[in-house]
Image (cartoon, rainbow, N blue to C red):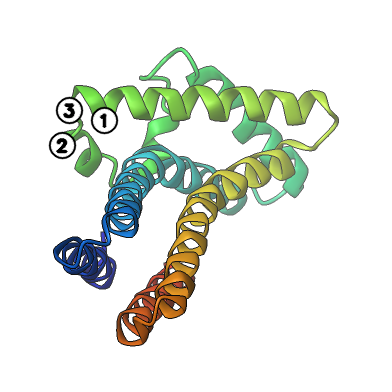
Amino acid sequence: MSKSFEKSIKQIVDVANYLDENRQFEMSSQLDKIAANLVQIKTAQYVGIQGYWMRNTRCWKNCYRQKRSSEKGKTAQEIWTECHREYLGSINNPTSGWEKYAQDDNKITKFAEEKIKKIIGAEKSKFDNELRQKIEDGFEPSVAANSVINDNILKYSSLIINEVKNLIKISERLKEHGAKNISLRVSKITNDIIKDVIDS
C-alpha cells in the first residue's frame, strides 16, 4: 500500500474520531467502515494482483517476447497460440515450466501464508474460468488473456471509487450540517485517494 494511500486512510480515521468526540456517531461509523473497506480492498489488490494477476501478466508478456525473438519465422498468432498451449499445460501442473516466465515470482512465495495462498488460488481459478469462457466465445488467445487480465486489474480501482463516492456523500452531509472545515478535509482526502487510484 502506498504511503499516500496509508496517509489518506489515517486521515479518514482521524476525522471519524473527531466526529465521534462530537457525538456524530452515524457519520463516524460510516467513515470507520469506509477506512476498513479501503484497507481490505488495497490488501486484496496487492495480494490478488501481485500474487496472481501481475504474475500472469509477466508470464504472458515474457512468453510472447521470448518466443517472438527466438522463433522469428512464426506469426504473432502462432506465438500466442503456443503460449496459450503452455498456459493450459500449467493449470493443474505448477511445475510445467510456465512459471519460468514470471521472473521474480520467488519474492511472492516467500511471504505466501495460508490466507494469501487461498486468495491466489481463487484468483487463479477465476482467471482460468474467464479465459476459457472468452476463448469458447471466439476470442483469440492473445485478446482473451489481455482482456481477462485488464478486467481484473481494474476491478480494484472500481471498488475504491465506490468508497470515494461514499466519502463524497459524507462530505456533502457535513457541509449541510455546518461543518464546513471538516467537509473540506474529507473532500481533500477524497481527492488524494482519487489521485492515488489514477497513479497506481
Which residue is identified by label 3? 113
31 sits left or right of 112 in the view: right
CB atoms of marks 1 and 3 within 8 Å: yes
Compared with 181, 200 (above or below) is: above
Q: Front-most of 20 and 98?
A: 20
Residue pictured at 53% horizontal, 50% vertical: 61
For the residues labelled 2 and 1, say whether their Cβ atoms are less than 8 Å apart.
yes
Residue 14, image x, y percentages: 17, 68
Residue ID for mark 2: 111
- Quarter residue 163 falls in: bottom left
Q: Nearer the viewer, residue 188 or 31?
A: 31
Residue at 40 percent of width and 75 percent of height? 177
Q: State which quadrant residue 67 falls in.
A: top right
Q: CA distance from mark 2 to mark 1?
A: 8 Å
Amino acid bearing label 3: Glu
108 relative to 140 in the view: left or right: left
Circle 2/circle 3 CB separation < 8 Å: yes
Q: Dot 3 lies on which element? A: loop
Identify the residue shown where x is 64% and y is 47%: 146
- Residue placed under numbered mark 1 in the picture: 116
Front residue of this view, candidates 141 and 42: 42
